[in-house]
Amino acid sequence: MKIGAFIFATDYAIRTDELARELEHRGFDSLFLPEHTHIPVSRVSSYPGGGELRKEYWHTYDSFVALAYAAAATRTLKIATGITLLPQHDTFNAAKAVASLDRMSEGRMLFGIGGGWNVEEMGNHGVAYGTRFKVLRERVLAMKELWTSEEASFEGDFIKFDPVWAWPKPKQSPHPPILLGGNTDHTIRRVVDFCDGWIPANWPGFDAVEGMNRLRRIADEAGRDVSDFSVTLVRGEPDRAKLDAYEKAGLTRVLLTLPSADRDTVLRQLDDYAFPVVARKLMATGRASWRQASFLGHTLDRGES
């Protein structure tokens, strides 16, 4: 199981190129960035996580630009949108941004997408809330055509275009993995229908074993194998027992949340997280027991030999 990081990249937080270097140095697998183009001042949409909406939601950088900086500063770290609110994007611009990032990062892009929850934000983009998942599905299928066809065309209810030339094509074949965010069975059915992976959130009540069982059941119903799909848990808990449970359940990747804060604050949190990452890597290679790996993990984080 891989361990990555999730952060709202904002204009008041650590730069993404600095953070990416620090993540790669500590052995993290990936960096996932969410997005919101804006947050309407007046809204009735409730925040899915409960409570008041935090200011980081309206201070986010453009995730594609921020990830470009992260990619340029690293060599192995996966760069990922987590998530892109795809119904709010133009098909051609989104396809070109993803393909460009994938090529310039030498195939390290993961394309996390979602339908969104903010009715008012969506409305400002000209998208009706009730059609968002129909638009999302068509946009994904149209983008796949743009990525894989010499002369791409598409005919849908919301997206239509005659044959076009569109380059660059992605580095990964046939395209970067497409991961869909959400916790419902409807989300999982969409994953099985037109995506490559699932991004559930560790909201109260989420159970990794139950989630994997739902994915397995829905994949079976569609004649697919559960191993066809990656599962990336957002907001994972960074203690030994939880990480062991996530791995035993069959998760592909767990994302640990970093605060949208200044460099020193983020790196202190990252150091707290880094020890289980280093320790698990040492154990996976058979180089240490958990107790030895725990000690070595702390030592490596401090730069000692």
Image (cartoon, helix red, strand yellow):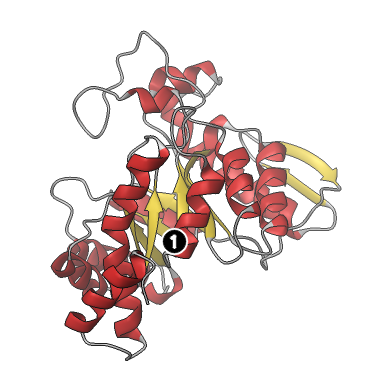
Residue identifier under label 1: 197
Q: Which residue reaches farthest bottom? A: 286
Q: Quadrant of residue 291?
A: bottom left
| On screen, residue 26 above or below 63 | below
Q: Position of residue 83 (x, y in %)?
A: 46, 43
At horizontal 34% and vertical 12% (from top left) the residue drawn is 43
At horizontal 84% and vertical 46% (from top left) the residue drawn is 163
| On screen, residue 35 above or below 4 | above
Q: Which residue reaches farthest front? A: 305
At horizontal 70% and vertical 37% (from top left) the residue drawn is 93
| Identity, as a three-letter code, of the amino acid under mark 1 | Gly
| On screen, residue 37 above or below 66 | above
Instruction: Mark yes or no: residue 227 visible.
Output: yes
Left or right: 82 as drawn, with respect to 51: right
Neighbor class of circle 1 (other Cα within 10 Å; few <14, some 14-19, many 20+) is many
Q: Which residue reaches farthest top? A: 42
Instruction: Mark yes or no: residue 200 visible.
Output: no
Q: Position of residue 8 (x, y in %)?
A: 41, 37
At horizontal 20% and vertical 73% (from top left) the residue drawn is 244
Q: Which of 121/12 is in front? A: 12
Left or right: 68 as drawn, with respect to 243: right
Q: Position of residue 76 (x, y in %)?
A: 57, 67
Q: Which of 137/258 is in front? A: 258
> Could you tell me which quadrant the N terminus lies in?
bottom left
Q: How many marks?
A: 1
> Could you tell me which quadrant the C terminus lies in?
bottom left
Q: Disc 1 on helix, strand or loop?
A: strand
